[in-house]
Image (cartoon, rainbow, N blue to C red):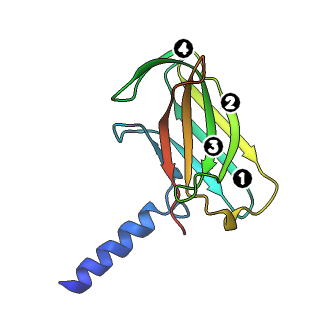
Amino acid sequence: MGRWLSALVAFLWLAASPAHAAGGVPMLDSDGLEQGSAKVNLEKGSVKVNATLAPLPAAIDTGTVQFEATLYKAYLLSSTDPAVEIPLASVYPSALGKIAVKATLKGNVTQLGLDRVVIVAFSKDGLNSFDVLTGTLVAP
């Protein structure tokens, strides 16, 4: 039974790794639903995100606060070190809610501990923000 479990774990890890996933890293909303995907190559410093977001202005419910988002921003960041984040782009969905972000960092960023791609919604006054989409990078 132990070999089967080990084989299953190895298979699931390979299937979840960005090097083996056909669509890249899934971009999940706060309910855990996939709303798009991100292809990230930290060695080359390239990021491509295709996803669906609510058109702006958008009503955002964080579970404790509700606000109207007037801006989305995309980031690469480290979940272990909040001081490490790379802004990628301001994001404005089409009328259908589609977004495409493409960023070239022009360098190897593997040593920074980056492990997430996020799209953050911001209120007009900047006092409220919420991660509306998150993609967790898995080492290949």
Residue bearing the label numbered 4: 57
Q: Is residue 39 above or below residue 34?
A: below
Specify whether 112 is left or right of 138: right
Residue bearing the label numbered 3: 75
Q: Check if mark 2's residue and mark 1's residue have beta carbons within 8 Å.
A: no
User: Which mark lies nearer to you, 1 or 3?
Assistant: 3
Residue bearing the label numbered 2: 90
> Residue 75 at what x, y percent from top left?
63, 43
Q: Quadrant of residue 114?
A: bottom right
Front position in the image: 44 or 19 = 44
Q: Residue furthest left?
A: 1
Q: Residues within 10 Å of mark 4 (few under 14, many from 20)?
A: some
The kind of residue on which mark 1 rests is Ser
User: Which mark lies nearer to you, 4 or 1?
Assistant: 4
Q: Along the polypeptide, which appears first: circle 4 or circle 2?
A: 4
Front position in the image: 83 or 20 = 83
